[in-house]
Amino acid sequence: MSKWRLGKLKDVDSWPWKWWRWASSKWRLIPLLDRWLLGELIPVLLFAIAAFTVVSVSVGVMFDLVRKIVEFGLPLHFALQVFSLKLPFFLVISFPMATLLATLLAYSRLSSNSEFTALRSLGVSTRRIVAPALALALLMTGLTFIFNDVIVPRTNSSAEVTIKRALGKAIATEKGKHVVYSRFGTITGAEAEDWNQGLSQLFYAREFLKGEMEDVTVLDLSRLGFTQMLKAERAIWNEQEAMWEFFNGNILTLTPRGSTTSVEFDRYLYPLTSGPIRVAKLPKDANNMTVAQAMEAASIYTDAGNRKEARRLKVRIQEKFTFPMSCLVFGLIGSSLGAKPNSRTSRTQGFGISLLLILAYYTLSFSFSSLGVTGTLTPMLAAWIPVFISLAGGGLLLRQASR
């Protein structure tokens, strides 16, 4: 490195030097015990994040990209771009698991070396020993939420656009394929007392492109005994009329007596909410939605009377908050297990124990999530009960380690 560059780096007015001085001053404010324990935890955490990310990326995206390169001729630079865009998703998956493995391994090693025995002899409680691990777990919780809600939805969408462009498929700013919107409501009959609740309208469009629905079919079941099917080449949402405007199509009506009528049209206004166009603009997978998008989607399906889909999205909204909390859960469990007197856990054993604990936690979470989707539990209870159960279990382990 040239003398000019060395001088520039050592210049007290340069931003790297200022940042380093600020970080060093803040680090010195942390008590010595916490600095020592964090110094033991952070290297293991980084190793665990790298290990879990490599495994999940290899299984989740690398094999698929290699297949696309070989079978479809995907250019290598596009494959590398997609790989980098998919990386945040797998990092988010790795954060909770890495927190568990890091706290378990680091604290087990310190316990087996009698470091914690020496601290306890000086009057330092187990809860005080575990505190830095919980602080690091809280930091990972916040980082996981930011990645999961801000970064991952954008990078996943960009990866999808990139790979479609690379494979020669048409991409538009506003786009969607196979848009399906169901509206539930009152189905009326000829008499005032003839009515029931159920599916009243089913909207399907083969593609949504630049604000227009193409190849549209609407099934109208809002009148008892009548089945009406509307087909059109395209449709747009008419903001002024607050209705859908269909072009170049026909309407087929089946009456209760079995007779049919068919009417062709060039332009037809149909009374339906803007729900289909709002759904088309949202990601299909709730895991790729931000919290705001998921709340908007839940509102759309609630207005449409689709209670099951609305419940499913409300559960996913709560899981946007409970998934990052798994870092705190695993941090508490891992540090409590590792801080037990005479705990001896190798890296291989720690990896195996971590996998078992992760499997148990996510099995519990998926079970309660299903209860929330079916309506047995409220979305909030379905998402948060596994967290509370696991935190209670971690608290019991900490209590045992404190004896």
Image (spheres, rainbow, N blue to C red):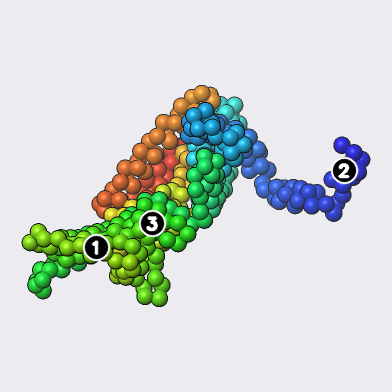
The residue under label 1 is: 251
Counting from the top left corner in percent of width and height, residue 247 is at 35, 64
Give the alpha-carbon distance from disc 2 to disc 1, as whole Å: 75 Å
Tell me the distance, in whole angstroms, between the alpha carbons under discs 3 and 1. 16 Å
Quarter of the picture holding the N terminus: top right
Q: Amino acid at mark 3?
A: Glu
Q: Position of residue 6 (x, y in %)?
A: 88, 42
x 85%, y 54%: residue: 13
User: Element type at marker 3?
Assistant: strand
SS under mark 1: strand
Q: Nearer the viewer, residue 221 or 379?
A: 221
Circle 2 packing at 10 Å, graded few (<14), some (14-19), many (20+), is: few
The answer to whether mark 2 and mark 1 are in CB contact below 8 A is no
Asked if residue 306 shows in the view, the reply is: no
Q: Is residue 212 left or right of residue 225?
A: right
Residue 85 seen in the figure: yes
x, y (%) of residue 290? 47, 55
Residue 353: give x, y in percent of width and height.
45, 29
Q: Residue at the location (30% across, 46% down)? A: 370
Q: Contact (CB < 8 A) between labels 3 and 1?
A: no
Q: Nearer the viewer, mark 2 or mark 3?
A: 3
Q: Which mark is residue 5?
A: 2
Q: Three-letter amino acid code at disc 1?
A: Ile
Query: Which residue is pictured at 62% across the width and 36% down the height?
Result: 77
Question: Around disc 3, counting alpha carbons within 10 Å, would you say few (fewer than 14), some (14 to 19), or many (20 or more)?
Answer: many
Mark toward the start of the polypeptide (2 vs 1): 2
**Measured Cα–Cα span from mark 2 to mark 3:** 60 Å
**Precedes in sequence: disc 2 or disc 3:** 2
Q: Which mark is residue 214?
A: 3
First reached walking from the N terminus: tag 3 or tag 1: 3
Task: Judge left or right: residue 170 versus residue 298.
Answer: right
